[in-house]
Amino acid sequence: MSHVQAEEEEELLATQSRTHGRRIKAVFFDFMGTCLDWHSGVASALPATIAEATRSRLALDWREEFFRELHARSQRGLPLEDIDITHRKTLLRILGRDVYEGERRHFVGLDEEGNNNGALPSSTTSVAPPPPPPPGGGTDAVERAVRSWHNMVPWSDVRPALTALKESSELGGLELFVLANGTTRLQLDLVRSSGLEGLFSLLFSSELLGVYKPAPEAYEKALRLVQVRPDEAVMVAAHAYDLRAARALGMNTVYVHRWTDDRSEDMDAVRRENDAFLGERENGMEGLYSVIKALS
Protein backbone atom coordinates (compact mmCIF):
# COMPACT_ATOMS: atom_id res chain seq x y z
CA MET A 1 0.00 0.00 0.00
CA SER A 2 1.39 3.41 -0.97
CA HIS A 3 1.78 6.30 1.44
CA VAL A 4 -1.03 8.18 -0.33
CA GLN A 5 -3.37 5.17 -0.16
CA ALA A 6 -2.61 4.73 3.53
CA GLU A 7 -3.49 8.37 4.22
CA GLU A 8 -6.72 8.07 2.23
CA GLU A 9 -7.73 4.92 4.13
CA GLU A 10 -6.93 6.55 7.45
CA GLU A 11 -9.07 9.55 6.56
CA LEU A 12 -11.93 7.28 5.46
CA LEU A 13 -11.82 5.35 8.73
CA ALA A 14 -11.74 8.60 10.69
CA THR A 15 -14.77 9.90 8.78
CA GLN A 16 -16.70 6.67 9.34
CA SER A 17 -15.86 6.78 13.04
CA ARG A 18 -17.10 10.35 13.37
CA THR A 19 -20.32 9.59 11.50
CA HIS A 20 -21.03 6.38 13.41
CA GLY A 21 -20.54 8.07 16.76
CA ARG A 22 -22.59 11.12 15.91
CA ARG A 23 -25.64 11.50 18.12
CA ILE A 24 -27.66 14.08 16.16
CA LYS A 25 -28.48 13.04 12.61
CA ALA A 26 -31.44 15.24 11.69
CA VAL A 27 -32.78 18.68 12.55
CA PHE A 28 -36.46 19.43 11.93
CA PHE A 29 -37.58 23.04 11.63
CA ASP A 30 -40.97 24.59 12.02
CA PHE A 31 -41.22 27.14 9.22
CA MET A 32 -43.51 30.17 9.59
CA GLY A 33 -42.49 32.22 12.60
CA THR A 34 -39.44 30.08 13.34
CA CYS A 35 -37.56 30.53 10.07
CA LEU A 36 -39.75 33.05 8.28
CA ASP A 37 -40.93 36.54 9.20
CA TRP A 38 -44.61 36.06 8.42
CA HIS A 39 -45.67 39.33 10.06
CA SER A 40 -43.93 41.75 7.69
CA GLY A 41 -45.41 40.23 4.56
CA VAL A 42 -48.90 39.72 5.92
CA ALA A 43 -49.21 43.17 7.51
CA SER A 44 -48.00 44.87 4.32
CA ALA A 45 -50.50 42.87 2.23
CA LEU A 46 -53.47 44.22 4.20
CA PRO A 47 -55.16 47.31 2.68
CA ALA A 48 -52.85 50.32 2.83
CA THR A 49 -55.86 52.47 3.72
CA ILE A 50 -55.80 50.85 7.17
CA ALA A 51 -53.40 52.46 9.65
CA GLU A 52 -50.04 50.68 9.92
CA ALA A 53 -50.39 49.98 13.65
CA THR A 54 -53.84 48.51 13.09
CA ARG A 55 -52.57 46.31 10.26
CA SER A 56 -49.85 45.00 12.56
CA ARG A 57 -52.33 44.22 15.33
CA LEU A 58 -54.75 42.63 12.88
CA ALA A 59 -52.01 40.37 11.52
CA LEU A 60 -51.04 39.25 15.04
CA ASP A 61 -54.66 38.58 16.00
CA TRP A 62 -55.20 36.69 12.76
CA ARG A 63 -52.22 34.45 13.47
CA GLU A 64 -53.49 33.62 16.97
CA GLU A 65 -56.98 32.87 15.67
CA PHE A 66 -55.45 30.58 13.04
CA PHE A 67 -53.69 28.58 15.75
CA ARG A 68 -56.90 28.34 17.79
CA GLU A 69 -58.74 27.00 14.76
CA LEU A 70 -55.99 24.52 13.93
CA HIS A 71 -55.80 23.16 17.47
CA ALA A 72 -59.59 22.92 17.69
CA ARG A 73 -59.75 20.93 14.46
CA SER A 74 -57.00 18.63 15.67
CA GLN A 75 -58.62 18.05 19.06
CA ARG A 76 -62.01 17.29 17.49
CA GLY A 77 -60.46 14.87 15.03
CA LEU A 78 -61.67 16.83 12.01
CA PRO A 79 -60.09 16.15 8.61
CA LEU A 80 -57.23 18.28 7.35
CA GLU A 81 -58.24 21.52 5.68
CA ASP A 82 -56.43 23.48 2.97
CA ILE A 83 -54.50 26.19 4.81
CA ASP A 84 -55.80 28.89 2.46
CA ILE A 85 -59.35 28.04 3.51
CA THR A 86 -58.35 28.16 7.18
CA HIS A 87 -56.60 31.50 6.75
CA ARG A 88 -59.55 32.96 4.86
CA LYS A 89 -62.22 32.03 7.38
CA THR A 90 -60.11 33.01 10.40
CA LEU A 91 -59.41 36.43 8.86
CA LEU A 92 -63.13 36.99 8.36
CA ARG A 93 -63.83 35.80 11.89
CA ILE A 94 -61.32 38.31 13.28
CA LEU A 95 -62.89 41.10 11.23
CA GLY A 96 -66.21 40.27 12.87
CA ARG A 97 -64.89 41.50 16.22
CA ASP A 98 -66.08 44.86 17.52
CA VAL A 99 -62.52 46.16 17.69
CA TYR A 100 -62.25 45.91 13.90
CA GLU A 101 -65.65 47.39 13.09
CA GLY A 102 -64.01 50.31 11.30
CA GLU A 103 -61.87 48.02 9.15
CA ARG A 104 -64.64 45.73 7.86
CA ARG A 105 -65.51 47.86 4.87
CA HIS A 106 -62.05 47.23 3.43
CA PHE A 107 -62.90 43.53 3.15
CA VAL A 108 -66.61 43.48 2.27
CA GLY A 109 -67.55 40.55 0.08
CA LEU A 110 -67.17 37.20 1.87
CA ASP A 111 -68.70 35.54 4.87
CA GLU A 112 -66.74 33.36 7.31
CA GLU A 113 -67.07 30.31 5.05
CA GLY A 114 -65.78 32.20 2.01
CA ASN A 115 -69.18 32.67 0.32
CA ASN A 116 -69.88 35.79 -1.72
CA ASN A 117 -72.68 37.56 0.10
CA GLY A 118 -71.53 41.17 0.18
CA ALA A 119 -71.03 41.32 3.93
CA LEU A 120 -68.74 40.23 6.70
CA PRO A 121 -69.70 38.56 9.99
CA SER A 122 -70.32 41.02 12.76
CA SER A 123 -70.83 40.68 16.47
CA THR A 124 -73.35 43.51 16.27
CA THR A 125 -76.53 43.78 14.21
CA SER A 126 -77.06 46.75 11.92
CA VAL A 127 -80.00 47.50 9.64
CA ALA A 128 -77.89 49.81 7.47
CA PRO A 129 -75.94 48.19 4.63
CA PRO A 130 -72.18 48.40 4.90
CA PRO A 131 -70.47 51.17 2.93
CA PRO A 132 -68.76 50.13 -0.31
CA PRO A 133 -65.14 49.07 0.01
CA PRO A 134 -62.43 51.52 -1.08
CA PRO A 135 -60.47 50.83 -4.29
CA GLY A 136 -58.47 47.63 -3.95
CA GLY A 137 -60.71 46.37 -1.16
CA GLY A 138 -63.54 43.84 -1.00
CA THR A 139 -62.92 40.25 -2.00
CA ASP A 140 -59.67 41.24 -3.72
CA ALA A 141 -58.34 42.47 -0.38
CA VAL A 142 -59.27 39.20 1.30
CA GLU A 143 -57.60 37.08 -1.36
CA ARG A 144 -54.50 39.27 -1.43
CA ALA A 145 -54.18 38.86 2.34
CA VAL A 146 -54.63 35.09 2.14
CA ARG A 147 -52.05 34.78 -0.64
CA SER A 148 -49.52 36.76 1.40
CA TRP A 149 -48.93 33.67 3.54
CA HIS A 150 -47.27 32.10 0.48
CA ASN A 151 -44.65 34.85 0.17
CA MET A 152 -42.26 35.50 3.08
CA VAL A 153 -38.71 36.52 3.82
CA PRO A 154 -36.53 34.66 6.32
CA TRP A 155 -35.39 36.20 9.57
CA SER A 156 -31.88 37.59 9.09
CA ASP A 157 -30.28 34.91 11.30
CA VAL A 158 -31.80 31.94 9.47
CA ARG A 159 -29.85 31.52 6.22
CA PRO A 160 -26.43 31.74 7.93
CA ALA A 161 -27.54 29.23 10.58
CA LEU A 162 -28.94 26.74 8.07
CA THR A 163 -25.93 27.08 5.78
CA ALA A 164 -23.51 26.48 8.65
CA LEU A 165 -25.34 23.30 9.65
CA LYS A 166 -25.73 22.06 6.08
CA GLU A 167 -22.08 22.60 5.12
CA SER A 168 -20.48 21.49 8.37
CA SER A 169 -17.97 18.67 8.06
CA GLU A 170 -17.66 18.70 11.84
CA LEU A 171 -21.28 17.61 12.25
CA GLY A 172 -20.92 14.92 9.60
CA GLY A 173 -23.54 15.52 6.95
CA LEU A 174 -26.43 16.66 9.11
CA GLU A 175 -29.81 16.50 7.35
CA LEU A 176 -32.25 19.40 7.67
CA PHE A 177 -36.01 19.08 7.24
CA VAL A 178 -39.08 21.30 7.42
CA LEU A 179 -41.82 19.86 9.64
CA ALA A 180 -44.74 22.26 9.68
CA ASN A 181 -48.50 22.50 9.40
CA GLY A 182 -49.91 23.50 6.03
CA THR A 183 -49.92 22.25 2.47
CA THR A 184 -46.99 21.10 0.39
CA ARG A 185 -47.83 23.86 -2.12
CA LEU A 186 -47.48 26.43 0.66
CA GLN A 187 -44.08 25.07 1.69
CA LEU A 188 -42.79 25.02 -1.88
CA ASP A 189 -43.88 28.63 -2.34
CA LEU A 190 -42.27 29.67 0.94
CA VAL A 191 -38.96 27.97 0.23
CA ARG A 192 -38.83 29.73 -3.13
CA SER A 193 -39.91 33.19 -1.93
CA SER A 194 -37.56 33.07 1.06
CA GLY A 195 -34.57 32.03 -1.03
CA LEU A 196 -33.91 28.97 1.13
CA GLU A 197 -33.83 26.49 -1.76
CA GLY A 198 -31.32 23.69 -1.44
CA LEU A 199 -30.98 23.87 2.34
CA PHE A 200 -33.62 21.28 3.27
CA SER A 201 -33.51 17.61 2.34
CA LEU A 202 -37.31 17.30 2.45
CA LEU A 203 -40.42 19.30 3.31
CA PHE A 204 -42.89 17.56 5.63
CA SER A 205 -46.29 19.26 5.58
CA SER A 206 -49.32 18.22 7.61
CA GLU A 207 -50.98 17.55 4.26
CA LEU A 208 -48.22 15.12 3.35
CA LEU A 209 -48.21 13.43 6.76
CA GLY A 210 -52.00 13.34 7.03
CA VAL A 211 -52.10 14.89 10.51
CA TYR A 212 -51.58 18.26 12.20
CA LYS A 213 -48.88 18.97 14.72
CA PRO A 214 -48.87 18.62 17.70
CA ALA A 215 -50.38 15.14 17.22
CA PRO A 216 -47.63 12.61 18.06
CA GLU A 217 -48.21 10.88 14.73
CA ALA A 218 -46.84 13.90 12.83
CA TYR A 219 -43.41 13.63 14.46
CA GLU A 220 -43.39 9.84 14.56
CA LYS A 221 -44.16 9.50 10.86
CA ALA A 222 -41.49 12.03 9.85
CA LEU A 223 -38.89 10.26 12.00
CA ARG A 224 -39.87 6.89 10.61
CA LEU A 225 -39.64 8.07 7.01
CA VAL A 226 -36.08 9.37 7.43
CA GLN A 227 -35.13 6.40 9.64
CA VAL A 228 -33.96 8.46 12.61
CA ARG A 229 -34.66 7.77 16.28
CA PRO A 230 -36.16 10.57 18.41
CA ASP A 231 -32.94 10.94 20.42
CA GLU A 232 -31.02 11.41 17.16
CA ALA A 233 -33.25 14.30 16.09
CA VAL A 234 -33.75 17.93 17.09
CA MET A 235 -36.96 19.91 16.72
CA VAL A 236 -36.43 23.67 16.33
CA ALA A 237 -39.47 25.91 16.72
CA ALA A 238 -40.76 29.26 17.91
CA HIS A 239 -43.85 27.60 19.37
CA ALA A 240 -43.85 25.99 22.80
CA TYR A 241 -46.76 23.65 22.00
CA ASP A 242 -44.74 22.20 19.11
CA LEU A 243 -41.68 21.50 21.25
CA ARG A 244 -43.69 20.05 24.12
CA ALA A 245 -45.12 17.45 21.77
CA ALA A 246 -41.72 16.66 20.24
CA ARG A 247 -40.07 16.42 23.65
CA ALA A 248 -42.74 14.02 24.90
CA LEU A 249 -41.60 11.62 22.18
CA GLY A 250 -37.95 11.85 23.17
CA MET A 251 -36.75 14.41 20.62
CA ASN A 252 -34.24 17.09 21.55
CA THR A 253 -35.81 20.55 21.44
CA VAL A 254 -34.54 24.05 20.72
CA TYR A 255 -36.78 27.08 21.22
CA VAL A 256 -36.20 30.15 19.05
CA HIS A 257 -37.83 33.24 20.49
CA ARG A 258 -39.57 35.49 17.94
CA TRP A 259 -41.54 38.56 18.99
CA THR A 260 -44.35 37.60 16.59
CA ASP A 261 -45.23 34.28 18.20
CA ASP A 262 -46.12 32.77 21.59
CA ARG A 263 -47.02 36.21 22.93
CA SER A 264 -48.90 34.73 25.89
CA GLU A 265 -46.29 32.13 26.89
CA ASP A 266 -44.15 32.45 30.03
CA MET A 267 -40.68 32.64 28.49
CA ASP A 268 -38.94 31.73 31.74
CA ALA A 269 -40.91 28.48 31.79
CA VAL A 270 -40.24 27.87 28.10
CA ARG A 271 -36.53 28.38 28.69
CA ARG A 272 -36.55 25.69 31.40
CA GLU A 273 -38.54 23.22 29.30
CA ASN A 274 -36.12 22.87 26.41
CA ASP A 275 -32.56 21.76 25.74
CA ALA A 276 -31.76 25.25 24.49
CA PHE A 277 -33.43 28.66 24.28
CA LEU A 278 -32.28 31.04 21.57
CA GLY A 279 -33.51 34.52 22.39
CA GLU A 280 -32.08 38.00 21.88
CA ARG A 281 -29.24 37.53 24.34
CA GLU A 282 -28.25 34.33 22.51
CA ASN A 283 -28.42 36.20 19.15
CA GLY A 284 -31.34 34.11 17.98
CA MET A 285 -30.62 31.32 15.55
CA GLU A 286 -26.99 32.41 15.28
CA GLY A 287 -26.39 30.21 18.30
CA LEU A 288 -27.95 27.11 16.76
CA TYR A 289 -24.72 25.60 15.43
CA SER A 290 -23.15 25.59 18.90
CA VAL A 291 -26.30 24.05 20.37
CA ILE A 292 -26.40 21.22 17.82
CA LYS A 293 -22.69 20.62 18.30
CA ALA A 294 -23.18 20.36 22.06
CA LEU A 295 -26.11 17.95 21.63
CA SER A 296 -24.01 15.82 19.30
Image: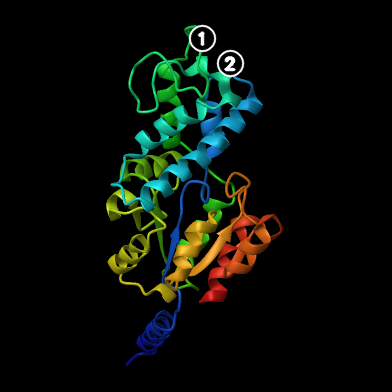
- Badge 2 crowding class, 10 Å Cα cut-off, few under 14, some 14 to 19, many 20 or more, is few
Vertical position of residue 159 compared to residue 24: above or below: above
> Would residue 279 appear left or right of 58 to someone viewing this image?
right
Instruction: Say which residue label 2 marks.
Output: 49
For numbered disc 1, what is the local secondary structure?
loop
In percent of width and height, residue 154 lies at: 52, 44
- Badge 1 crowding class, 10 Å Cα cut-off, few under 14, some 14 to 19, many 20 or more, is some
> Would residue 101 appear left or right of 249 to someone viewing this image?
right
Query: Residue at the spot x=48%, y=38% of the render?
Result: 152
Split into 4 quadrants, where in the image is the N terminus?
Answer: bottom left
**In this view of the protein, which residue sits in the foreground, 277 or 142?**
142
In percent of width and height, residue 21 lies at: 43, 84
Of label 2 and label 1, which has the lower sequence position?
2
In percent of width and height, residue 62 lies at: 51, 35
In percent of width and height, residue 164 lies at: 52, 61
Instruction: Say which residue label 1 marks.
Output: 134
Q: Are marks 2 and 1 in contact (CB under 8 Å)?
A: yes
